[in-house]
Image: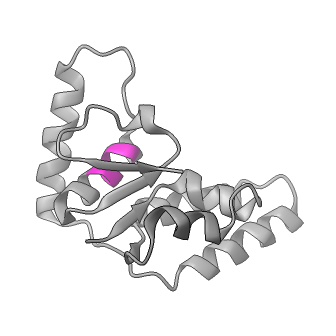
């Protein structure tokens, strides 16, 4: 098995709100993977930083996590995404997940990975998704 880590967790580590040891305490020795979606969100956050110093700090954090293997988005991911998006739309729930969250969920479901997040509400009721939280 493996673990796909939600962007919010990487941000918490960067900001010092979580230590890498906190994550290891939850996931153990399971391999950790990155999504291109997470890379995009973190890059966006770095490019929109309020100061050059914050931008550099965020880019350095992004560079550190880039050692993790990156999952590809392929046609199967797209099919899973389409199904999950339709389920979300048809559920009638007032909370609609963001597009990026559905892509992350699609990748986790596709590979049978757990998704580590602190934003459980963004992912609840997604069929087939295994959620782990800190």
Relative height, residue 44 to residue 85 (above, below):
below
Judged left or right of residue 18, residue 79 is left
Instruction: Name the residue at the bottom extreme.
Output: 67
Q: Please check the rendered image and state whether residue 127 is part of the magenta-colored stretch, yes or no.
A: no
x and y, in percent, of residue 47 in the image: 69, 60
Q: Please state the total of marks drawn on the protein image.
A: 0
The answer to which quarter of the image holds residue 99 is top left
Magenta-drawn segment: 101-105
Colour convention = one colour
Judged left or right of residue 16, residue 116 is left
Q: Main secondary structure of the magenta part?
A: helix
x and y, in percent, of residue 36 in the image: 41, 66
Towards the viewer: 68 or 21: 21
Q: Residue at x 83, y 62 (%)?
A: 54
Q: Residue at x 30, y 16 (%)?
A: 93
x and y, in percent, of residue 29 in the image: 42, 78
Q: Residue at x 43, y 31 (%)?
A: 121
Q: Residue at x 26, y 31 (%)?
A: 125
x and y, in percent, of residue 108 in the image: 27, 58
Towards the viewer: 23 or 103: 23
The answer to which quarter of the image holds residue 124 is top left
Quarter that holds the N terminus: bottom left
Relative height, residue 67 to residue 40 (above, below):
below
């Amino acid at each position: 098995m493996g673990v796909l880590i939600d962007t919010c967790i990487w941000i918490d580590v960067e900001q010092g709100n979580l230590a890498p040891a906190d994550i290891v305490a939850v996931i153990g020795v399971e391999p950790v993977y990155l999504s291109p979606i997470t890379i995009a969100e973190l890059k966006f956050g770095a490019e929109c930083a309020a100061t050059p110093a914050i931008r550099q700090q965020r880019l350095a954090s992004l560079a550190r996590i880039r050692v993790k293997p990156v999952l590809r988005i392929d046609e199967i991911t797209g099919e899973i995404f389409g199904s999950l998006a339709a389920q979300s739309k048809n559920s009638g729930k007032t909370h609609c997940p963001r597009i990026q969250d559905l892509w992350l969920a699609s990748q986790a479901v596709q590979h049978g990975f757990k998704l580590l997040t602190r934003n459980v509400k963004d992912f609840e009721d997604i069929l087939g998704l295994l959620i782990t939280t800190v």
